[in-house]
Image (tube, grey):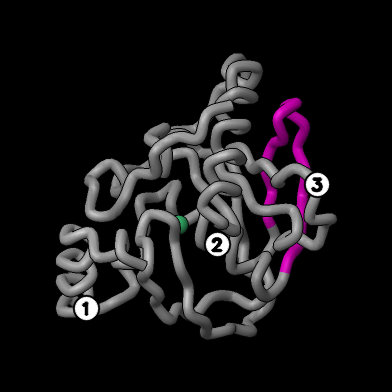
Amino acid sequence: MPIRPIVRYPDPRLKQVCRPIAPHELPSLRRLVNDMAETMFAANGAGLAAIQIGEPLRLFIVDAEIAGRAATDPPLTFINPEIEALGNAKELAEEGCLSFPGIYVPIERALRCRGRALDLDGQPFEMEGEALFARAMQHENDHLNGRLLADYVGRLKRKMIERRLERGEDEDI
Ligand code: NI
């Protein structure tokens, strides 16, 4: 279960729309999800999308504790997810991303949302979350559509983020 390199902004791979996973591909996903979990834990992340380790699939994981489970539980796996806002309440909070080390961007998200997806056995499930969990589902789902932290800021701040990540300033943090 190797830790895999995390694709960092502005790598163009992060901008692609990821493809749905076919039922026959499910058995081959366990290894990938194990790699994603190892990689997320090693980087202290709250969630990780497959594209962040270079696999353009509609798949993400969310840390169990963020999802209200025991910290020792395995991450929740969302395959071909659909995320839908519940109600009109919004919350503004600083958000980070493992593909943007050291960068935090204030983003307004739905306070509550519902996620529908398949699990690793191909079984459909549905979860509702709020606050940090809802934010994590919305953030990871954005990755599947090539939407990134940099898309929530103006042009000048985006340039600043690009310069900072290209210089690798985060390596010093
Ligand atoms: Ni992210």
Q: Earlier in the sequence, mark 2 or mark 1?
A: 2
Amino acid type of the residue tagged 2 in the rendering: Gln
In this rendering, the label closer to the viewer, 2 or 3: 3
Q: Of the numbered discs in the image, which one, if any, rests on residue 73?
A: 3
Residue drawn at the location 80% of the way across and 49% of the way down: 72
Total count of labels: 3
Task: Look at 42% across and 38% down and name the residue there.
Answer: 53
- Residue 114 drawn above or below residue 60: below
Q: Is residue 18 visible?
A: no
Residue 86 figure quarter:
bottom right
Q: Amino acid at mark 1?
A: Lys
Q: Magenta residues?
A: 115-129
Secondary structure type for disc 3: loop
Q: Is residue 66 visible?
A: yes
Q: Residue at x 58, y 84 (%)?
A: 91
In this rendering, the label closer to the viewer, 3 or 1: 3
Q: Which mark is residue 30?
A: none
Quadrant of the displayed image that contains ligand 1: bottom left
Q: Is residue 100 left or right of residue 112?
A: left
> Is residue 139 located in the magenta-colored stretch of the structure?
no
Q: Quadrant of residue 65?
A: bottom right
Give the residue type that dot 3 points to. Answer: Asp
Residue holding disc 2: 138
Which is closer to the viewer, label 2 or label 1? 1
Establish if 110 lies above or below 34: below
Q: How far apart are labels 2 and 1 at the CA level?
A: 22 Å
